[in-house]
Image (spheres, grey):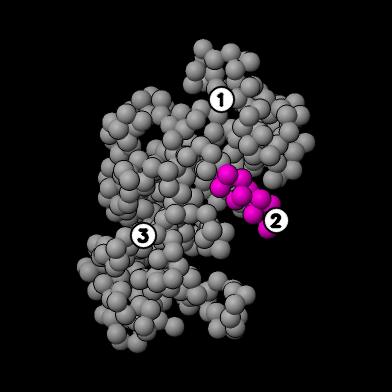
């Protein structure tokens, strides 16, 4: 399987009054064609910043300070997206790489009917398309996300939150992109609607074969849909691998803590524990490993928390990477 997106040493900085805050620090990973990749982590871990970096939508005072984002198009031509001008990148945004942002239902223009959103989006990228062609494609997409055609003549305020979210998903698929980035697409929706949206995304993936990158802080939401899982902490990618391996045998203490904090119907819920402490201030990072202040291995004196040793990812399984150099002891000693 070939990667469709290769992210190499991506760092994104924000200039603030107290210094430079590195929200995304030296992130490298491969996104494979046809996969659904989940990126999880607490708020402030760098998930949304990573998505904005891929889409090249970082705004001042932020900047992409280094790295490469290589997109492999349908002809297997490699394009470094970060070397493109804004005008050049605009040809790929929405046509090849598109997104559903967090609280995406708020991006719908309240003065336009739903069909006008689809028409304007399509014509912005291809003014040769006819209204009939666009609406035919739109009706097909609405059907895929389980919405009726009458939605086209509705204004956003006439739709529920779940309906608006499904409308945005359909809109993101209008130009048949290769990659769909979903940033917390189920935020602010009730549990039943969340699972309804997830089922729709699974169906869209099966029928269209689109590559998806799913960013969320809710581990339980994405466990049943993703193929690979990446874990971010304090701006760094700390673990990456097949979802089953990550769930059953995490090799970073932070990942272990996330997995063992999820309530379960199969064991004693009182055994589930939250990760102690709080993420570090990115302007005042510890001299040790970034997770050390919250890590059992460090607190028990088993690990010295050497920050230099966490500058790289270690192979912890056949298709699994971790930033913890004590990874062999994680499942044996963490609690």
Quarter of the picture holding the C terminus: bottom left
Residue 192 is marked as 2
Q: Quadrant of residue 87?
A: top left
**Quick check: is 36 in the magenta stretch?**
no
In the image, farthest residue toward the left: 308
Front label number (1 vs 3): 3
Q: What secondary structure do most residues of the magenta stretch adopt?
A: helix
- Residue 176 x/y as whole percent: 50, 30
The numbered mark, 2 or 3, whose residue comes first in the sequence reads 2
Structural crowding at the residue carrying mark 3, measured as other residues with C-alpha within 10 Å and reported as few (<14), some (14–19) or many (≥20): many
Residue under label 3: 240
What residue do we see at 29% from left, 63% from top?
Answer: 318
For disc 1, the marked residue is 121
Q: Residue at x 69, y 45 (%)?
A: 162
> Residue visible at 38% across and 42% down?
33
In the depicted structure, whether residue 133 falls above or below residue 265: above
Q: Which one is earlier in the sequence, the residue at label 1 or at label 3? A: 1
């Amino acid at each position: 399987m070939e990667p469709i997106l290769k992210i190499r040493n991506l760092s994104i900085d924000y200039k603030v009054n107290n210094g430079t805050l590195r929200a995304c620090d030296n992130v490298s990973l491969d996104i494979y064609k046809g996969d659904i990749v989940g990126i999880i982590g607490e708020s402030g871990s760098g998930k949304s910043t990573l998505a904005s970096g891929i889409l090249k939508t970082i705004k001042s005072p932020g900047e992409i300070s280094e790295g490469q984002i290589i997109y492999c198009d349908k002809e297997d031509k490699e394009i470094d997206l970060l070397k493109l001008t804004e005008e050049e990148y605009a040809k790929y945004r929405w046509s090849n790489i598109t997104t559903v942002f967090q609280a995406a239902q708020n991006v719908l223009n309240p003065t336009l009917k739903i069909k006008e959103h689809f028409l304007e989006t399509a014509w912005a990228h291809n003014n040769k398309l006819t209204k009939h062609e666009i609406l035919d494609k739109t009706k097909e997409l609405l059907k895929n996300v389980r919405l009726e055609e009458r939605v086209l003549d509705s204004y956003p305020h006439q739709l529920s939150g779940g309906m608006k979210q499904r409308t945005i998903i359909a809109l993101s698929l209008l130009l048949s992109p290769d990659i769909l980035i979903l940033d917390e697409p189920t935020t602010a929706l009730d549990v039943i609607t969340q699972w309804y949206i997830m089922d729709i995304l699974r169906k869209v993936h099966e029928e269209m074969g689109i590559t998806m990158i799913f960013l969320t802080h809710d581990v339980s939401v994405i466990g049943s849909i993703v193929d690979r899982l990446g874990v971010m902490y304090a701006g760094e990618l700390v673990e990456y691998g097949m979802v089953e391996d990550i769930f059953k045998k995490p090799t970073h203490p932070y990942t272990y803590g996330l997995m063992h904090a999820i309530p379960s119907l199969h064991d004693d819920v009182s055994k589930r524990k939250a990760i102690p402490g709080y993420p570090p201030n990115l302007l005042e990072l510890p001299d040790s490993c970034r997770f050390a202040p919250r890590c059992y291995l460090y607190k028990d004196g088993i690990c010295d928390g050497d920050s230099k040793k966490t500058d790289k990812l270690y192979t912890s399984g056949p298709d699994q990477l971790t930033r913890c150099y004590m990874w062999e002891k994680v499942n044996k000693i963490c609690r």
